[in-house]
Image (tube, helix red, strand yellow):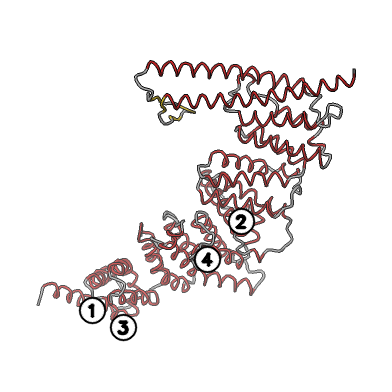
């Protein structure tokens, strides 16, 4: 007989011997040595391919008590063997049947701990495979538990989610279709795993309106909150062409359904659950819990108000402005993130809330809420700092949408705020153009006290000035300066000195002192400086051996790509062109002022 076959038969014989000895013992008489011998012999049978013989032993009615007490020890080697065999291998089928039998026969408490330990020890590419393999036996065991059932369900869901969280979430259509690590499939399997416990809770709540066993409800709520943060906050949830049932949309729908079933959906959206966060002595833990909760709630609002999951459950009684107010905290959370998936969710949620509203309908009092001031500032950061072009463009469109929704006083207050806080000439130029549009509307369509008279003069003090006087970097602030000059030109043309509706003629001396004169001085200094630089570069070029001499330029602490002398000259000429443009508009404004003043003087003479 070959030695290998002899060893295998010995392993089966050893198992049979241990089983026969234990059959005659009482349950209480099992010793630690019996457990060890059973585990070693069972593991040897599995590793040597004798799963069929092991299955026979487990199915034997005489061994019921032995399996109940010792079977849980086989979970670890059993899982290893299942992954070792190919899908169609008979031996793998035998191993899967053993797993089902253990779930039915073993002591639920011991098997529960063994299954959780197996999930906890898995890592990397095997996480989803292991979780999906063990979900059914774990569910079977949990349904049998009598004591600490809610705690055990919560522990299982928390362990599973903790193991899944480090895995990358498929984002593109190709990644979702490939589902390389099995995360899409696994997430939906976890929801199916949780359903019997949701149904049990719902059944108990229906039986009694005073049902107050909150533990299972809290554990299911924690699972939903974790699922909202991962994977749903990161996932791409738009319907994708060619994918009939988007796995993450399906998962999101199931999570929203669970929240509705356990009567937590509306309280989460509108009441924030401020009192439901656990109290942590450690401040760091408390802040982390608060941040996780904020991320989850932001994702939930996105699912409801953008993807319209569960929206049919909501009573149609909330005004658009109230919905915006409720969502501003969530929008702020999302706009502070840098990841594309989260930023785009924040922009979509903001846009969705604004599109529900009529123009000019949002009362200025809403700007007393902190978030109504913070969110447009965050939007400006996305517009100016985000490296993703389509998100920058979208944020600009949404800023305009936000401005359009406010009443006149709201627009006025928002303009003042953004002029003071944006610190970006392009944004300031954009706001100044908006101010011009509001003045035009006030002069031509309706008399508006916020964009005429003393209110406008106060606003013009912020607009028609140079941040650092004549020393201001005119190139850096060119967008703002051009917008300011265009606004002033418009005011001088549109508002006669005799009418002076805007008050611009009253404040003209101040405008000349704070804006026009310093701008003249600044232009002269800047042009002289850049002309001298051009002269130097041309002289240096003549002295150099080649016009392709390369130098490096540092801008804002960042080293820019190397530039030849020709490239540097192009940049300097471009700057001079900008100064000439500013100078020509400035000259036109001053000419208009002079003509208007002369016309008035001629009238009076």
| N-terminal label among 4 and 1 | 1
Q: Nearer the viewer, mark 4 or mark 1?
A: 4
Kindly report the distance in space between the C-alpha atoms of the residues bearing marks 3 and 2: 54 Å
- Which residue is outermost to the bottom? 61
Q: How many marks?
A: 4
Contact (CB < 8 A) between labels 2 and 4? no
Kindly report the distance in space between the C-alpha atoms of the residues bearing marks 3 and 1: 11 Å
**Residue in the picture at 56% in, 38% down:** 384
Q: Secondary structure at mark 2?
A: helix
Q: Crowdedness of circle 4 by 10 Å Cα count: few (<14), some, many (20+)?
A: some
Work out whether residue 373 or residue 521 is closer to the camera in this orientation and state it. Answer: 521
Kindly report the distance in space between the C-alpha atoms of the residues bearing marks 1 and 2: 60 Å
Contact (CB < 8 A) between labels 3 and 2? no
Q: Secondary structure at mark 4?
A: helix
The residue carrying mark 2 is 301
The picture quadrant where one finds residue 517 is: top right
> Quadrant location of the N terminus?
bottom left
Q: Secondary structure at mark 1?
A: helix
| N-terminal label among 3 and 1 | 1
Q: Report x, y in % for residue 102.
A: 36, 75
Residue 40 drawn above or below residue 271:
below
Residue 536 horizontal side relative to residue 602, left or right: left
> Which mark, by number, is residue 16?
1
The residue carrying mark 4 is 250
> Which mark, by number, is residue 60?
3
Q: Report x, y in % for residue 190.
A: 47, 66
Kindly report the distance in space between the C-alpha atoms of the residues bearing marks 4 and 3: 42 Å
Kindly report the distance in space between the C-alpha atoms of the residues bearing marks 4 and 1: 48 Å
Q: Nearer the viewer, mark 4 or mark 3?
A: 4
Q: Nearer the viewer, mark 1 or mark 2?
A: 2
């Amino acid at each position: 007989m070959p030695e290998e076959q002899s060893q295998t038969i010995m392993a089966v014989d050893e198992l049979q011997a241990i089983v026969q000895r234990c059959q005659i013992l009482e349950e209480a008489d099992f010793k630690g040595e019996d457990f060890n011998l059973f585990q070693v012999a069972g593991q040897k049978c599995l590793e040597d391919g004798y799963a069929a013989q092991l299955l026979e032993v487990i199915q034997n009615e005489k061994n019921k008590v032995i399996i109940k007490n010792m079977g849980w020890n086989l979970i670890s080697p059993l899982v290893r063997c299942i992954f070792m065999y190919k899908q169609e291998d008979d031996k793998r089928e035998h191993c899967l049947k053993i797993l089902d039998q253990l779930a039915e026969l073993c002591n639920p408490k011991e098997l529960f701990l063994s299954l959780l330990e197996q999930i906890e020890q898995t890592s990397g590419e095997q996480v989803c495979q292991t979780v999906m393999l063990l979900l059914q036996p774990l569910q079977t065991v949990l349904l049998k538990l009598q004591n600490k059932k809610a705690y055990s369900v919560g522990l299982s869901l928390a362990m599973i989610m903790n193991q899944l969280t480090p895995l990358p979430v498929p984002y593109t259509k190709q990644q979702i279709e490939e589902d390389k690590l099995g995360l899409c499939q696994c997430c939906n399997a976890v929801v199916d795993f949780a359903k019997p416990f949701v149904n049990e809770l719902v059944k108990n709540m229906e039986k009694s309106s005073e049902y107050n066993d909150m533990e299972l409800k809290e554990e299911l709520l924690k699972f939903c909150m974790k699922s909202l943060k991962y994977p749903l906050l990161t996932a791409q949830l738009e319907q994708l062409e060619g994918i009939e049932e988007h796995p993450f949309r399906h998962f999101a729908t199931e999570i929203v359904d669970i929240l509705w079933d356990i009567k937590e959906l509306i309280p989460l959206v509108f009441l924030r659950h401020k009192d439901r966060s656990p109290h942590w002595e450690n401040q760091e833990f408390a802040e982390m819990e608060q941040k996780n909760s904020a991320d989850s709630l932001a994702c939930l609002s996105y699912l409801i108000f953008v993807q319209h999951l569960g929206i049919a459950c909501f009573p149609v009684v909330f005004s658009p402005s109230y919905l915006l107010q409720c969502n501003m905290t969530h929008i702020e959370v999302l706009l502070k993130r840098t990841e594309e998936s989260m930023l785009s969710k924040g922009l979509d949620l903001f846009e969705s809330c604004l599109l529900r509203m009529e123009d000019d309908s949002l009362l200025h009092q809403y700007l007393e809420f902190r978030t109504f001031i913070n969110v447009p500032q965050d939007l400006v950061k996305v517009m100016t700092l985000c490296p993703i072009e389509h998100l920058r463009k979208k944020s600009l469109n949404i800023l305009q949408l936000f401005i359009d929704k406010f009443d006149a006083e709201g627009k006025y207050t928002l303009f003042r705020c953004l002029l003071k806080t944006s610190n970006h000439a392009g944004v300031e130029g954009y706001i100044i153009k908006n101010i011009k549009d509001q003045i035009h509307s006030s002069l031509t369509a309706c008399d508006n006290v916020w964009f005429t008279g003393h209110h406008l003069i106060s606003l013009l003090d912020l607009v028609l000035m140079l941040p650092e006087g004549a020393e201001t970097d005119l190139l850096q602030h060119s967008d703002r300066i051009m917008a300011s000059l265009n606004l002033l030109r418009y005011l001088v043309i549109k508002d006669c000195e005799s009418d002076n509706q805007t008050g611009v003629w009253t404040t003209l001396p101040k405008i000349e002192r704070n804006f026009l004169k310093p701008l003249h001085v600044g232009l002269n200094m800047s042009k002289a400086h850049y002309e001298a630089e051009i002269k130097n570069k041309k002289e240096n070029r003549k002295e150099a051996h080649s016009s392709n001499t390369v130098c490096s330029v540092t801008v804002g602490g960042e080293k820019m790509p190397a530039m030849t002398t020709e490239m540097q000259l192009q940049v300097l000429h471009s700057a001079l062109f900008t100064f000439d443009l500013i100078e020509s508009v400035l000259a036109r404004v001053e000419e208009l002022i002079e003509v208007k003043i002369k016309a008035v003087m001629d009238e009076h003479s």
